[in-house]
Image (cartoon, grey):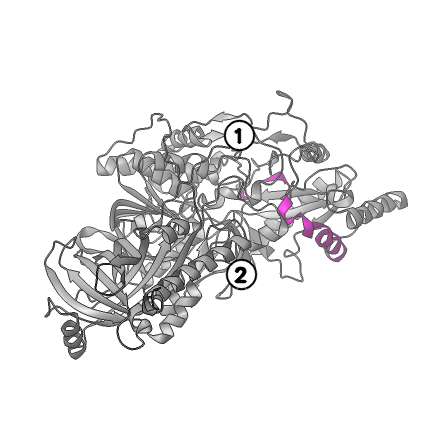
């Protein structure tokens, strides 16, 4: 397979861009692609990791390592885990965390809402009065995402048991099941942006990540297109809030994920832009905007309101008469098991009811292989606790019991679990959920949502669908009296909804954020572009509507700012960006600095201490190639971080172009090595400074190794580089307590195994201690 890594090292980030896009799902990726095509200098920030096909979990153990849970103000699991669960009392949310957002773990369905949804009064007037702008951008999104139905019977594509079961369910309900448009590739070749893709293996693992390059996630289209047109893409960056900066710019404040700078109490880094597009997903964008309001940004009081789960319901037709084959392959090779198919392929469409809100769609589904090991015990237990057999026929009951025992003995690819259909329903809840910040953590409240009458109607329809295939209906265990009928959604919408004014919503029809709690005034250059802007349940999978709204927002942005988006095809030419094992640690140093001294470090330190002029930084040092670092004394590691220096700015400064050199030989009377730090500092007042610091490692009289490796002599220049005038001098040190914390932050990056990780850490430790040995011990030994 031919795939190129799109993300760049964070040390490459600049201090300012024309556009910053936050997130990488449908809305964000579209903004990055289209605005890059419009000639804008674009920076995209994604909080998750970058996965290439072949790197997604295949086993239960691998999947567990990628699960993160946020609940009651606590976070469990890795902050960059691919599978992100937001747990709440009333309704919980599953979404994706990685470069590509939820497109990495969704079911790829492109289904437009029925006409009455698009004509609803919840939409802004400008959008309702210009429906062509919606449909025009639906076409643009479809061109990029390339939705198509499963090609049953064409070129040997087989019938799928789960789709056949849906046909029987539909027939029993007096309905018809049809194949859906899904964003999946069924033929090897280049897609419409020139990215190589490969035919679907029918493995059923869409929702844990496609390892075969067949799923048309944004990582396969909009994101490589953005990169191909010059966008800079950075991962593992968690944006916290946005503020207004000097000169009409926006500051985006962020933390580096997994750098552990929080153990030092370090403030956020920031980067500025003329335009900021929030596309961090319904939960992410709302959380960032809520926190930005707390930090002083003026916005509508409706931020967080009108959250909807899009009427999502999950249910199962357990232990059916016929084989359904709804368990994904997981670690099994394609061809070793009977085909499952893409996660969702067909639908029983129950829309176009006399009352809009009574409509629903029922789609087939499957369980991805990496979590299949929990299916047998879960389904057996849930079926006993929350369901009952519908058949009184002894023979049928014995057959079901035999199939259940087969699953228990042989596993989920056999027996009852292999005869289980998964159903996913979308309908219309009342859209009155609310998101808020509680102790700086997002919380969703929506009392009694699961008791709304529509969900009882869904339950009845799923029982009908299950009866038609001679199965035992099993509800989602959270939607029970025991669990107070709580819900789980994979399609969260709302929170920053579109409206005509700030009294009714958060953004206008273009996605521009209202600048007050009343009126139609907006913040110039601040947009939201994702599911958060959708003002009501769509009753269908929302991705194509989110995409169309994002395309439309970019179209209008280009008109307002006077640039042209070039929609023509351009061959992808991307640099080879293969990762090598690296090493990373975070360091805090503190001391004193004075602008009244231009020559002496000691004098600068003393003057700074007398004046209370402190200087402190927290820097993350990263080498993306530890092997070269240990062999080449001129190898440059990257620096990312933040500086606090009241003599330069009352607010924290961020850095760019940070370079760290470890143990550079210095010409001197005694063996000497330098550790060098070089970086450009940027204040929120848009001032720029150049920083150069060094540690001198040499054997003077006495035991001075600790002092040498923990003392940094610093010079700050008033300008972009070392040719600029010297502003001041000082000395920083590592305090003992901070050194202990620093040791906990040291980690190996991108190792292929735990064994390789240990080996690399050992090599680095030997190199570091060996260099010190050469200076402090070997130089004293007699020569023979």
| Residue 306 in view in this figure | no
Classify residue 554 by image quadrant. Answer: top left
User: Magenta span covers which residues?
Assistant: 357-385
Residue 695 lies left or right of residue 745; in this view the side is left
Which residue appears farthest toward the bottom when viewing the image? 610
Q: How many marks?
A: 2
Classify residue 382 by image quadrant. Answer: bottom right
* Residue behind mark 1: 198
Foreground: disc 1 or disc 2: 1
Magenta stretch contains residue 381: yes
* Residue behind mark 2: 88
Image location of residue 459, percent across then percent down: 66, 48
Image location of residue 664, percent across then percent down: 28, 57
Q: Along the line of sight, which residue is nearer the eye, 460 or 321?
A: 321
Image location of residue 100, percent across then percent down: 45, 43
User: How many angstroms separate mark 1 from mark 2 (CA)?
Assistant: 39 Å
Above or below 678: residue 567: above
Magenta segment main secondary structure: helix
| Residue 472 in view in this figure | yes
Q: Earlier in the sequence, mark 1 or mark 2?
A: 2
Q: Along the line of sight, which residue is nearer the eye, 434 or 227?
A: 227
Q: Along the line of sight, which residue is nearer the eye, 388 or 607?
A: 607
Magenta stretch contains residue 769: no
Which residue appears farthest toward the top when viewing the image? 155
Give the quarter of the figure containing the C terminus: bottom left
Label 2 neighbourhood size at 10 Å, few (<14), some (14-19), many (20+)?
A: some
* Mark number, residue 360: none
């Amino acid at each position: 397979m031919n795939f190129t890594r799109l993300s760049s090292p964070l040390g490459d980030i600049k201090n300012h861009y024309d556009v910053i896009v936050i997130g990488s799902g449908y809305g964000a990726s579209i903004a990055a692609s289209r605005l890059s095509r419009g000639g804008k200098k674009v920076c995209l920030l994604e909080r998750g990791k970058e996965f290439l096909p072949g790197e997604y979990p295949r086993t239960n153990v691998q999947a567990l390592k990628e699960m993160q849970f946020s609940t009651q103000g606590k976070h469990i699991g890795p902050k960059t885990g691919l599978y992100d669960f937001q747990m709440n009392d009333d309704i919980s949310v599953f979404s994706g965390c990685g470069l590509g957002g939820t497109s990495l773990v969704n079911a790829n369905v492109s289904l437009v809402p029925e006409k009455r949804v698009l004509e609803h009064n919840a939409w802004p007037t400008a959008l309702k009065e210009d429906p062509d702008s919606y449909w025009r951008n639906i076409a643009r999104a479809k061109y990029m995402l390339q939705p198509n139905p499963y090609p049953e019977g064409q070129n040997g594509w087989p019938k799928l048991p789960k789709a056949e079961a849906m046909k029987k369910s539909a027939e029993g309900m007096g309905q018809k099941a049809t194949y859906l448009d899904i964003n999946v590739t069924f033929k090897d070749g280049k897609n419409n942006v020139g990215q190589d893709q490969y035919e679907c293996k029918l493995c059923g693992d869409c929702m844990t990540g496609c390892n075969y390059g067949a799923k048309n996630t944004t990582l396969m289209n909009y994101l490589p297109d953005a990169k191909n047109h010059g966008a800079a893409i950075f991962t593992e960056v968690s944006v916290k809030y946005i503020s207004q900066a000097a000169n009409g710019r926006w500051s985006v404040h962020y933390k580096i994920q997994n750098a552990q700078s929080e153990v030092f109490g370090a403030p956020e880094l920031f980067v500025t832009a003329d335009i900021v597009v929030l596309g961090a997903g319904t939960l992410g964008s709302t959380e960032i905007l809520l926190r930005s309001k707390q930090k002083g940004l003026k916005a509508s009081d409706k931020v967080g309101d009108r959250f909807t789960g899009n009427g999502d319901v999950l249910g199962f037709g357990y232990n059916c008469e016929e084989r359904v084959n709804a368990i994904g392959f997981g670690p099994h090779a394609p061809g070793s098991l009977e085909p499952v198919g893409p996660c969702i392929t067909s639908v029983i469409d129950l829309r176009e009811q006399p009352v809009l809100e009574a409509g629903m769609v029922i789609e087939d589904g499957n369980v991805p292989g990496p979590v299949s090991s929990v299916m047998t015990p879960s389904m057996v237990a849930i079926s006993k606790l929350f369901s009952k057999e519908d058949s009184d026929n002894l023979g049928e009951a014995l057959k079901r019991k035999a199939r259940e025992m087969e699953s228990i003995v042989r596993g989920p690819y056999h027996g009852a679990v292999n005869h289980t259909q998964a159903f996913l329903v979308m309908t219309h809840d009342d859209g009155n959920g609310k998101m808020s910040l509680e102790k700086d953590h997002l919380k969703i409240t929506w009392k009694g949502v699961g008791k709304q009458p529509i969900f009882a109607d869904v339950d009845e329809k799923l029982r009908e669908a299950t009866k038609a295939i001679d199965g035992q209906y099993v509800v989602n265990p959270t939607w029970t009296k025991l669990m107070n009928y709580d819900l789980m959604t994979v399609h969260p919408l709302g929170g920053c909804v579109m409206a005509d004014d700030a009294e009714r919503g958060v953004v206008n029809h273009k996605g521009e954020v209202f600048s007050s709690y009343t009126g139609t005034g907006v913040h110039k250059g601040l947009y939201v572009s994702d599911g958060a802007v959708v003002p009501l349940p769509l009753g269908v999978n929302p991705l194509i509507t989110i995409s169309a709204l994002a395309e439309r927002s970019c179209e209008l942005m280009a008109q307002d700012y006077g640039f042209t988006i070039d929609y023509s095809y351009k061959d992808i030419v991307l640099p080879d960006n293969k990762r090598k094992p690296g090493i990373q640690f975070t360091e805090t140093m503190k001391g004193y600095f004075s602008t009244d001294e231009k020559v002496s470090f000691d004098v600068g330190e003393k003057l700074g201490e007398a004046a209370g002029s402190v200087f402190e930084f927290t820097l993350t040092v990263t080498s993306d190639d530890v092997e070269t670092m240990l062999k080449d004394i001129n190898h440059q590691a990257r620096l990312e971080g933040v500086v606090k220096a009241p003599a330069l700015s009352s607010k924290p400064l961020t850095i760019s172009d940070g370079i760290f050199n470890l143990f550079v030989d210095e010409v001197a009377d005694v063996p000497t090595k330098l550790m060098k730090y070089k970086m450009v500092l940027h204040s929120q007042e848009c001032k720029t400074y150049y920083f150069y610091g060094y540690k001198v490692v040499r054997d003077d009289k006495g035991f001075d190794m600790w002092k040498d490796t923990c003392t940094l002599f610093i010079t700050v220049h008033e300008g972009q580089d070392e040719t600029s005038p010297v502003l001041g001098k000082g000395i920083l040190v590592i305090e003992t307590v901070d050194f202990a914390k620093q040791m906990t932050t040291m980690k190996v990056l991108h190792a292929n195994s735990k064994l390789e990780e240990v080996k690399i850490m050992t090599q680095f430790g030997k190199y570091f201690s060996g260099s010190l040995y050469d200076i402090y011990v070997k130089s004293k030994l007699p020569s023979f």
